[in-house]
Amino acid sequence: MTTAEEQNPLLSDWTGALELPPFAAIKPGHFRPAFDRALAAHRAEIDAIAANPAPADFENTIAALERGGRALERIASVFFVLAGADTSDQIEAIERDVSPLLARHNNALYLNRALYARIADLYSRREALSLDAEQARVLERYHTRFVRSGAAIEKPAQDRLAAINERLASLGTQFGQNVLSDEKSFVMVLEEGDLAGLPDFAVAAARAAADERGHPGKYVITLARSSVETFLQFSSRRDLREKAFQAWIARGENGGETDNRTLIAEMVALRAERAKLLGFANFADYRLDDQMAKTPQAARNLLDEVWGKALTKANIERDSLQAMIAEEGGNFALAPHDWRYYAERLRKARYDLDEAEIKPYFQLEKIIEAAFETANRLFGLSFRRVNAALYHPDARAWNVSDAKGNHVALFIGDYFARPSKHSGAWMTSLRDQEKLTGNIRPIVLNICNFSKPAAGEPALLSFDDARTLFHEFGHALHGMLSDVTYPLLAGTAVPSDFVELPSQLYEHWLEVPEVLRKYALHARTGQAMPKALLDRLLATRTFNQGFATIEYTACALVDLDLHSLPDAEALDVTAFERKDLERIAMPAEIVMRHRLPHFQHLFSGGGYAAGYYSYMWSEVLDADAFAAFEETGNAFDPATAKRLRDYVYSAGNRRDPADAYKAFRGRLPTVDALLKKRGLVEAAAR
């Protein structure tokens, strides 16, 4: 190494006590040289495998690919954690530079004709290779990946495909940065007189946000979901609700440099072109061909069944809210910026319950403990807080061990919103589990955007926030409990319409009464939530579910329709969204949970493009899966939990997801449990 390389901490192994990256020593300037060196090393490894004069076998081709690129994976994992959770102008510039570079590198891997010839040869002889089940699955997944990436098409088409992939990588990076820029640029500064209706916890969070953003003595509402949704839920100032709501739904659609609509049009067109190059009619057909659903029509069938029942319930909910407005003498029609406010008031009237009464019982620290104890009771895991030098002071780490005291994983939680963090909540990793090169244990992160409290005050969550924490921790467990040999199959590396099963299923344990009785403790008194209040809270499970189902399902339907276009020449994104919502009879009082100009699931990385239906598909699975516990009369039934661990949480992508689910449950699910869970059966019967 040169002196500069020797001083680059990204080029060294992680040898500290917790095997973490040396975050304190890493500077933005270290990344590009480290990427260049790691990319060159991986290219050399790929070339050596492709040019190996020995006949292809599993060890010299598939296992060799699995062992390759370790330095690149290590550097990329650190970089993209920072790019998502603690970015800066320098990091964003590097991200714009590196994204097409990584796309070009993937093109070189998956369009390598000599390498594909070896894989295709192995695949054609797979029955005669004496492979074990996991090796056979790895070979099948590599063959599928290469074919779906264009390895089998002609060279001119490959060249065009490579150009498309690079351009999509650049556009996706820009899309996400534009959304973050719009979120950072908006603050609604409030005076004392603007706080009407806001409960104490919301006022305290707004004061803390103001202090953090340089507005001492004032109050600030940001576009972080935990901030703006709370304001919309409680503020009696209709004018300010409208101002906040319009800013929230207009992210990525404000004109100027951060407007995402031209980026979307180009991305949709490029995806359609890529699908045609690979022999598919449109991108949705291409995407779902390798998912559990298999076809867009299968996904639509589910969404359509749910949509009709949700629309019936949402219309009933709308009429109730409009009646409340009329009873109070309001001479206006319910608008989207009104729904959350009047729904909260209706919930209080019907159930003698409001969020201001509930929220003091949901302390962040106690909900973390609840998630940990649930994992202990289901899977025997223990969590011990450890001192760790991480990338931001808000992040903290826990050592995770099993019932025998063996190290399972390192878990990092980063829970508070800040200007340097992209919005939303997600699970990611700094290292994935595998056993090919030793007993490699994962380093898994949960990143959320809860409102940070004022100094000395406890962080309070809404019930939805608490559910989000359990959801992301379900993803984290999927990564931490992984028990496979080959990296390609590890943890969450499963189809996107199966990957939400472990996370959405885990949400159910938050609502188990014995969990709430132990951990829903009042922040001031320390008293457990009274049984009467707990009963009223659980009775609201299906309240406002028409609204919630409509705002989600509309997104999934628009996503499928957009990516079913055979081409997107001259696509007017705003007009398409409007017309598609008219086609499905979207209620005027409800807005998509993610409008297209800020729909990062689809366009920032594109991991859910033509796949946002996955949440609903997985919810069919999770509702049925939790019913397996309910049927035993024990939410922590050991035998059911063991099957769940063996066939879902620890199994990675060792088998087809339908086979994995049947191994756990004994059969595939029906939609009935989902409709019951969301209270849509009752609405349909009216």
Image (cartoon, grey):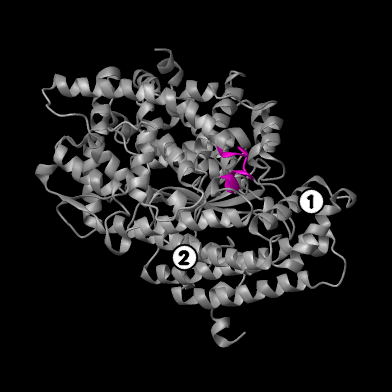
Residue placed under numbered mark 1 in the picture:
135
Relative side of 527 to 243, left or right: right
Residue placed under numbered mark 2 in the picture:
170
Relative side of 662 to 337, left or right: right
Q: Nearer the viewer, mark 1 or mark 2?
A: 2
Q: Is residue 35 above or below residue 322?
A: below
Q: Nearer the viewer, residue 599 or 241?
A: 599
Task: Specify the quadrant of the image occupied by residue 342.
Answer: top left
Q: Residue at x 53, y 30 (%)?
A: 302
Q: Position of residue 323 (x, y in %)?
A: 20, 20
Q: Earlier in the sequence, mark 1 or mark 2?
A: 1
* Circles 1 and 2 in contact, beta carbons < 8 Å: no
Report if residue 659 lies within the magenta region.
no
Q: Which residue is situated farthest in the bottom direction here?
A: 3
Q: Position of residue 580 (x, y in %)?
A: 39, 39
Q: Nearer the viewer, residue 74 or 50?
A: 50
Q: Is residue 291 visible?
A: yes
Span highlighted in magenta in the image: 285-296
Q: Which residue is situated farthest in the top direction here?
A: 686
State the CA–CA distance, disc 1 to disc 2. Answer: 35 Å
> Hey, what amino acid is under mark 2?
Ser
Crowd around label 1: few <14 · some 14–19 · many ≥20 (10 Å): some
Q: Position of residue 562 (x, y in %)?
A: 45, 46
Relative side of 199 to 92, left or right: left
Report if residue 292 lies within the magenta region.
yes
Q: Residue at x 50, y 70 (%)?
A: 98
Describe the element under mark 1 as helix, strand or loop: helix
Relative side of 103 to 594, left or right: right
Q: Nearer the viewer, residue 82 or 13?
A: 82
